[in-house]
Image (cartoon, rainbow, N blue to C red):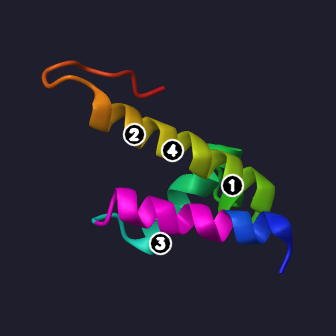
Amino acid sequence: MTASRAELLRLVAELSEADPDLRLGQMLTNLATLARGPATEAVWDAEDDELAAAARRLLARLRERRTAPTGTATSAG
């Protein structure tokens, strides 16, 4: 297993803990879209390191939402 694949799998596990209601297929599709944009081929073409970078961004957003004071909106972008 490559180092980037191992990192990606670790991040997927961390995302699963952070958002347990998100199904695996949804998560992978979201990561591919974050990595490559809303193209049909994004799921097929995304590299492990691109998906890992997207997973780190998504985790940061989830953590930001958890730590934001109640009633405070955070940017989605």
Tell me how far mark 1 sits from mark 2, CA to CA: 16 Å
Of mark 3 and mark 1, the one earlier in the sequence is: 3
Identify the residue position indicated by label 4 in the image. Answer: 58
Tell me how far mark 3 sits from mark 4, CA to CA: 15 Å
Outermost residue, bottom side:
1
Q: Residue at x 33, y 22 (%)?
A: 74
Q: Residue at x 65, y 51 (%)?
A: 39
Identify the residue position indicated by label 1 in the image. Answer: 52
Outermost residue, front side:
67
Crowd around label 2: few <14 · some 14–19 · many ≥20 (10 Å)? few
Crowd around label 3: few <14 · some 14–19 · many ≥20 (10 Å)? few
- Visible in this render: residue 38? no
Question: Which percent across, then down, holds residue 42?
Answer: 69, 57
Tell me how far mark 4 sits from mark 1, CA to CA: 10 Å
Q: Is residue 9 above or below residue 64?
A: below
Identify the residue position indicated by label 3 in the image. Answer: 25
Q: How many marks?
A: 4
Q: Nearer the viewer, mark 3 or mark 2?
A: 2
For the record, the magenta segment spans 8-20
> Residue type at mark 4?
Leu
Q: Nearer the viewer, mark 3 or mark 1?
A: 1
Q: Nearer the viewer, residue 69 or 42?
A: 69
Identify the residue position indicated by label 2 in the image. Answer: 63
> Residue type at mark 2?
Arg
